Image (cartoon, rainbow, N blue to C red):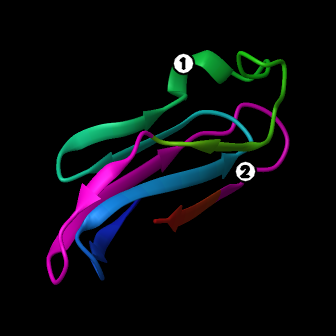
């Protein structure tokens, strides 16, 4: 589990992209915006892939405001890995 805060540079919708080997969950401002915790379950996601980039729904960030986040991930088999990227 990782946590911190993201400082909004602009007031606009931001998409968060997560690459994880198995389940992941991202919470921003107390709201779950990305959740593949159950669908991967160590056997692949709903597309039959164990890895791959998946995007969140757009999240409204406010310029100059810190937005607290929590990123959780799990690994059922092999090596653990999670990458978090964002774009607007």
Residue displayed at 44% across by 37% down: 34
Q: Which of 84/64 is in front?
A: 64
Q: Residues within 10 Å of mark 1 (few under 14, many from 20)?
A: few
Point 32% across, 50% down: residue: 59
Give coordinates of residue 74: x percent, y percent: 59, 39
Left or right relative to 5: residue 73: right
Pair 1/2: label in front: 1
Q: Which mark is residue 15?
A: none
User: Relative to residue 26, is residue 86 drawn left or right?
Assistant: right
The magenta span reads: 57-82
Decide if residue 5 is on the left or right side of residue 36. Answer: left
Q: Quadrant of the N terminus?
A: bottom left
| Residue at position x 31%, y 73% in the image | 6
State whether residue 1 appears in this view.
no
Describe residue 36's horizontal placement relative to residue 22 as left or right.
left
Question: Residue 42: horizontal and vertical position, in percent?
Answer: 74, 23
Relative to 80, say whether 61 is above or below: below
Residue sitting nearer the eye, 15 or 50: 15
Q: Mark 1 or mark 2: which comes first in sequence?
A: 1
- Image location (x, y in percent) of residue 38: 54, 18
Decide if residue 64 is in sight here: yes
Residue 38: mark: 1
Do labels 1 and 2 touch, CB within 8 Å? no
Q: Secondary structure at mark 1?
A: helix
Quadrant hosting residue 9: bottom left
Task: Name the residue tied to disc 2.
Answer: 80
| Secondary element at image label 2 | loop
Of residues 40 and 15, which is closer to you in this image? 15
In percent of width and height, residue 79 lies at 81, 49
């Amino acid at each position: 589990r990782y946590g911190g805060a993201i400082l909004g540079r602009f007031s606009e919708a931001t998409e968060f992209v997560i690459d994880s080997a198995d389940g992941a969950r991202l919470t921003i401002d107390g709201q779950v915006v990305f959740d593949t915790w159950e669908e991967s379950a160590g056997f692949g996601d709903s597309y039959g892939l164990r890895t791959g980039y998946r995007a969140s729904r757009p999240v409204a960030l406010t310029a100059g405001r810190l937005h607290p986040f929590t990123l959780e991930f799990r690994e059922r088999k092999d090596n653990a890995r999670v990458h978090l990227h964002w774009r607007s």
